[in-house]
């Protein structure tokens, strides 16, 4: 239930009611399913947590005592109870976002960052309708869903959440009778109870197929439904801002989707050529089944007969051609339907789609042929009095087919550069290949590629065989599922031109090149560390100047995509230095590409947490360097962010609107803020001092790694079934080799959230000493980049809790206590520095919605954190052999993550 001291504005009172009512339903469920003792323990812990935060010392001790020494089963039940409350609060807040959207639409007021709001801002800035329409031809937002599930909830639970959300939305109807309202409430309780009786997370590490099923839920159940309304909203927004203007018949494709699930091989031995084939086959199966179902609906609706209304000559000619080629679909049709041209057309389309599923001769050769048939029907309806007799539904099918094709989402393929080098060494049967200088390896590959005559294969190995099999699978999948089925080929840890040439060479060896010797594959270097980001423009300069690679780029449309990573750069240098390195890399990549007359494209490898590049997309887009967006935003979506942004249809719609609107605005001349030399100098000082502080603690301070492993549940996280990928990148066990997700996740659990803020305080202090407080405050106020950085860190600081983090010190050797004392002092200093720069008295004073969300959750997070400390102590004392305690710990990790959100 919401606390009385948490303020709700009048517009948010329905949220308070939903939170209270859902909380009561959860409480009733706990009494019924878990017993009165469990319910009392939950309520006692919650009340003590609230009183602790109000400053009652006795309550703090009572809270700690109440969660100590519980059996593993009782601890797990208590954690699940708190997690269930979190899910209720999360759901209530998401439904309230839907309610607020409806309020804006009802009042005919553009919601901030909506499509209409973005267009009105451009109109107010003097941008013409013609300029906007022209810009839309270049706009494309591509969210890429990745296999890093810090929230790998079962599909059945995701479906229950959707049903509960729809029930809550249905209760907004003022005409609902009391009986109908009671029935909806009872169904919500049924879903809550059924969810309690369902295992939340798999006991075994999920397979790639499990991850694929999880991600595809959002495509089939949410995004497939949302795409047509999104385009309709764009058309409505254009008409609202320019009511007299004529719109194009069909808007260009503004949204595409991508996925890494089944194609991301980097450090994951479970992903290979077979998973690429299986994933895209499943993509095709699901999307074609969706089309078949929609065509069934259209068959029932489009009953027009030629005796009542004509059809276009083009449609009739296509029908005749289909009759000649495939008469069998008509054999089972009722005779009374044979004079209905649209039903005839639909039967042929279903026949060809079913043939595509079965790889039969009648199959559509490419998705564009299916789209052409839909357009034929749409044009015929429009020309023959069908605008209000089915055209709307046909246009919706067109939007889906034009967006999803026969592949649903383009599958990116990713591999570590070291694997490519090893594969070539094995192909040459030359171990000395790996000892050569990168420049020499690049020179030899350049000669082979330019001569178009490769040396004879001299060796073989499992690495070589599996690598070549991937390129063969890429070629096969393009033939079967269409050119758009394969996205880009991403090279992790790309360090120079040789890494891009190596992919070209391996593709040639595997036979991926066409008759002209061109490789139909977009090769994308991933710049992950700060040194790689700094060297990225130089790498691009060198490779674009290479005549062999320049020829490849010319054949690919004279465009080069570069992926910039936020995760590893943050783990290496801290948040301020990482963000600045990414910002500078983008500007310099754009300049390098333009020198070679190549279109630069930036792919953002963002995670859910602030330390991994997470944050609000519109602000991030508007803060991007001038010239780096160019109508295109490609960004990874992962972890709990996928559920938060795409779990419910209305919120997915809102997410797409915000992103596309921001991309459109950022792409128009004069919209980006160009920082002057002084602001850049200030940020350089912040980044340098921040990086020095971060590396001084994490990589240079003696005993820090041991402290990290004792003060966080990293040993639990490394045993969790969070994903199919190992926790470490390679075989090493140090912080350098640990992947960014478990690194960030561990610090989140301990409530210190160190990667999301540490170092910034030292950077702000250095900048203030060098340039003065007024200059620093001006840059933070006027420069979207710095303003966004400070806003993101402020959120992390507000979610962190050093008092709770100090409880984890009972797990740490006394010799490491000084490290925590230093972290706590740095935390306090960072808070004060940030507030001073922003001119605020307390954190989140300018974001009451987020502040309220954190306060709503704290009474449930705090007991779980203290319980986690107790469980960790007992589990480690038993040499980590008690599986019951481990399972309870895993439940606590998931529960805390749900409570804090944006953790992965």
Image: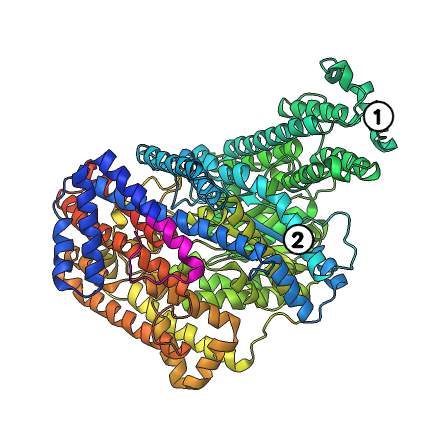
Residue 272: x %, y % from top left: 49, 35
Judge whether 305 appears above or below 568 on screen.
above
> First in sequence: mark 1 or mark 2?
2
Residue 774: x %, y % from top left: 44, 85
Residue 491: x %, y % from top left: 52, 50
Q: Nearer the viewer, residue 74 or 503?
A: 74
Q: Residues within 10 Å of mark 2 (few under 14, many from 20)?
A: many
Q: Is residue 641 one of those drawn in magenta?
A: no
* Residue of label 2: 234
**Magenta-drawn segment:** 1-20
Tag 2, which secondary structure? helix
Tag 1, which secondary structure? loop
Q: Is residue 10 one of those drawn in magenta?
A: yes
Way the structure is coloured: rainbow
Observer able to see residue 543: no
Quarter location, residue 477: top right
What residue do we see at 57% from left, 36% from top? 457
Q: Residues within 10 Å of mark 1 (few under 14, many from 20)?
A: few
Q: Is residue 803 left or right of residue 545?
A: left
Whether residues under marks 1 and 2 lie with C-beta atoms below 8 angstroms apart, the answer is no
Judge whether 108 appears above or below 505 on screen.
below
Q: Is residue 31 left or right of residue 230?
A: left
What residue do we see at 73% from left, 16% from top? 333
Residue 362: x %, y % from top left: 72, 22
Q: Nearer the viewer, residue 875 or 787?
A: 787
* Residue of label 1: 306
What residue do we see at 14% from left, 45% from top? 874
């Amino acid at each position: 239930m919401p606390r009385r001291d948490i303020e709700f504005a009048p517009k948010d009172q329905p949220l308070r009611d939903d939170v209270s009512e859902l909380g009561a339903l959860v409480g009733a469920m706990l009494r019924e399913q878990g017993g009165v003792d469990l319910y009392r323990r939950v309520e006692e812990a919650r009340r003590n947590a609230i009183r602790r935060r109000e400053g009652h010392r006795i309550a703090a001790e009572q809270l700690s005592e109440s969660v100590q020494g519980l059996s593993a089963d009782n601890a797990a039940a208590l954690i699940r109870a708190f997690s269930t409350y979190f899910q209720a609060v999360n759901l209530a807040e998401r439904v309230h976002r839907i309610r607020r959207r409806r309020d804006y639409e009802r009042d005919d007021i553009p919601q901030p960052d909506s499509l209409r709001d973005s267009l009105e801002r451009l109109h107010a800035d003097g941008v013409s309708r013609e300029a906007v329409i022209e810009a839309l031809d270049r706009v494309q937002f591509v969210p890429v869903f990745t296999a890093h599930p810090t929230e790998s909830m079962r599909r059945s639970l995701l479906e229950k959440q959707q049903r509960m959300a729809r029930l809550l939305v249905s209760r907004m109807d003022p005409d609902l009778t009391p009986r109908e309202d009671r029935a909806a409430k009872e169904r919500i309780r049924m879903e809550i109870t059924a969810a309690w009786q369902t295992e939340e997370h798999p006991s075994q590490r999920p397979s790639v197929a499990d991850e694929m099923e999880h991600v595809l839920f959002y495509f089939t159940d949410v995004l497939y439904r949302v795409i047509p309304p999104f385009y309709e909203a764009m058309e409505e927004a254009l008409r609202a801002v320019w009511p007299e203007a004529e719109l194009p018949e069909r808007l260009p494709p503004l949204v595409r989707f991508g996925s890494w699930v089944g194609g991301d091989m980097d450090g994951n031995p479970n992903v290979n050529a077979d998973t690429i084939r299986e994933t895209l086959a499943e993509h095709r199966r699901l999307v074609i089944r969706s089309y078949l179902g929609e065509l069934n609906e259209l068959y029932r609706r489009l009953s027009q007969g030629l005796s009542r209304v004509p059809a276009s000559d083009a449609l009739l000619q296509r029908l005749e051609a289909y009759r000649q080629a495939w008469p069998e679909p008509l054999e089972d049709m009722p005779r009374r339907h044979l004079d209905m041209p649209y039903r005839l057309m639909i039967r042929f389309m279903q026949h060809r789609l079913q043939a595509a599923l079965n790889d039969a001769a009648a199959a559509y050769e490419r998705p564009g042929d299916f789209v052409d048939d839909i357009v034929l029907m749409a044009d015929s309806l429009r020309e023959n009095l069908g605008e209000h007799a089915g055209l709307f539904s046909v246009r919706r099918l067109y939007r889906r087919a034009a967006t999803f094709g026969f592949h649903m989402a383009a599958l990116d393929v990713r591999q570590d550069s070291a694997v490519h080098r090893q594969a070539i060494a094995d192909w040459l049967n030359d171990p000395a290949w790996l000892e050569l200088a990168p420049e020499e390896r690049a020179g030899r590959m350049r000669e082979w590629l330019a001569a178009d005559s490769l040396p004879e294969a001299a060796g073989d190995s499992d690495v070589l065989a599996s690598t070549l099999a991937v390129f063969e699978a890429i070629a096969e999948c393009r033939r079967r599922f269409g050119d758009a089925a394969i996205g880009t080929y991403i090279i992790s840890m790309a360090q120079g031109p040789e890494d891009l040439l190596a992919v070209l060479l391996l593709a040639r060896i595997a036979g991926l090149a066409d008759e002209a010797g061109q490789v139909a594959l977009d090769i994308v270097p991933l710049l992950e560390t700060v040194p790689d980001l700094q060297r990225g423009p130089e790498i691009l300069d060198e490779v674009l100047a290479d005549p062999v690679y320049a020829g490849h780029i010319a054949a690919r449309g004279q465009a080069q995509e570069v992926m910039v990573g936020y995760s590893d750069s943050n783990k290496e240098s801290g948040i301020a230095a990482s963000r600045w390195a990414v910002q500078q890399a983008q500007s310099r990549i754009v300049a390098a590409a333009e020198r070679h007359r190549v279109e630069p494209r930036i792919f953002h490898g963002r995670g859910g947490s602030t330390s991994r590049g997470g944050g609000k997309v519109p602000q991030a887009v508007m803060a991007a360097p001038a010239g780096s967006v160019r109508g295109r935003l490609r960004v990874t979506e992962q972890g709990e962010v996928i559920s938060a942004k795409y779990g419910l249809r209305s919120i997915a719609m809102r997410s797409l609107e915000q992103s596309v609107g921001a991309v459109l605005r950022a792409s128009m001349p004069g919209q980006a803020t160009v920082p002057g030399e002084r602001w850049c100098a200030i940020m350089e000082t912040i980044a340098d001092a921040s990086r020095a502080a971060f590396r001084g603690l994490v990589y240079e301070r003696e005993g820090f790694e041991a402290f990290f492993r004792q003060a966080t549940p990293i040993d639990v996280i490394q045993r969790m079934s969070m994903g199919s990928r190992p926790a470490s990148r390679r075989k090493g066990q140090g912080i350098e080799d640990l992947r960014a997700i478990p690194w960030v996740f561990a610090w989140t659990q301990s409530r210190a959230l160190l990667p999301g803020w540490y170092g910034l305080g030292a950077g702000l202090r250095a900048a203030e000493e060098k340039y003065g407080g007024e200059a620093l405050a001006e840059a933070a106020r006027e420069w979207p980049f710095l303003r966004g950085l400070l806003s993101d860190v402020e959120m992390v600081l507000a979610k962190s809790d050093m008092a709770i983090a100090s409880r984890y010190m009972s797990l740490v050797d006394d010799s490491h206590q000084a490290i925590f004392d230093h972290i706590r002092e740095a935390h306090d200093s960072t808070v004060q520095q940030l507030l001073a720069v922003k001119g605020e008295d307390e954190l989140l004073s300018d974001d009451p919605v987020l502040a309220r969300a954190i306060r709503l959750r704290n009474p449930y997070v705090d007991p779980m954190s203290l319980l986690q400390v107790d469980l960790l102590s007992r589990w480690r004392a038993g040499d980590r052999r008690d599986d019951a305690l481990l399972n309870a710990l895993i439940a606590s990790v998931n529960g805390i993550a749900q409570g804090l959100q944006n953790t992965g």
